[in-house]
């Protein structure tokens, strides 16, 4: 192998008037959200294993505001199928990290699903 890499992006060309447009069917991954989700689960593990006492201690260690850490820790309470949807990039466009930080979701998974369903 000579170190070359190849990327395949599935797409089709569709005619729109006299122009051709590339239409891709690739998911829209929100990398900012995925990074935040990863940090949240890592921090939750630190708390669960007793390596830190609270989100405030994590905030001090990371140089973050405690509310930022606590907002991200709430992501660990999302229903597994919602997390799967976000990781697969199948979420509605308005469902961003900022939305999750500004809107509290109930702990009940079915209630979360009902709220997410309103985005479609």
Image (cartoon, rainbow, N blue to C red):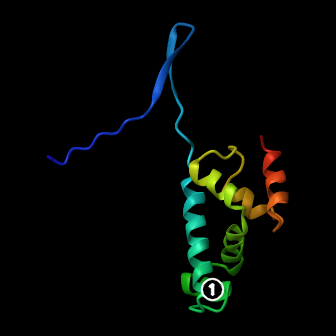
Q: Nearer the viewer, residue 97 or 84?
A: 84
- Above or below residue 98? Residue 72 is below
Q: Quadrant of residue 100?
A: bottom right
Callout 1 secondary element:
helix
Q: Quadrant of residue 82?
A: bottom right
Q: Going 68% across and 56% down the picture, which residue do you hit?
A: 81
Residue found at the far left of this picture: 2
Residue 74 vs residue 32: left or right? Answer: right
Q: Going 67% across and 84% down the picture, which residue do you hit?
A: 55
Q: Nearer the viewer, residue 107 or 99?
A: 107
* x, y percent for residue 42: 56, 76
Q: Going 60% across and 58% down the picture, which residue do you hit?
A: 33
Residue 36 vs residue 116: left or right? Answer: left
Residue found at the far top of this picture: 18
Give the labeled residue for mark 1: 48
- Above or below residue 118? Residue 101 is below
Residue 16 vs residue 4: left or right? Answer: right
Q: Nearer the viewer, residue 116 or 56?
A: 116
Numbered disc total: 1
* x, y percent for residue 7: 34, 39
* x, y percent for residue 11: 47, 27
Instruction: Estimate how packed mark 1 is, as few (under 14), some (14 to 19) or many (20 or more) residues with alpha carbons within 10 Å.
Output: few
* x, y percent for residue 103: 80, 61
Q: Going 61% across and 72% down the picture, which residue do you hit?
A: 40
- Above or below residue 74? Residue 83 is above
Quadrant assignment for the C terminus:
top right
């Amino acid at each position: 192998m000579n170190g070359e890499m190849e990327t395949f992006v599935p797409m089709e060309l569709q005619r729109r008037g006299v122009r051709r447009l590339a239409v891709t069917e690739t998911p829209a991954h929100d990398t900012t959200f995925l990074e935040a989700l990863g940090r949240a689960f890592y921090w939750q593990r630190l708390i669960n294993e007793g390596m830190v006492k609270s989100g405030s201690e994590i905030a001090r260690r990371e140089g973050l505001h405690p509310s930022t850490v606590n907002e991200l820790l709430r992501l660990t309470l999302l229903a597994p199928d919602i997390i799967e949807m976000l990781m697969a990039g199948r979420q509605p466009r308005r469902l961003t990290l900022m939305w999750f930080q500004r809107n509290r979701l109930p702990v009940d998974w079915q209630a979360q699903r009902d709220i997410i369903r309103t985005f479609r």
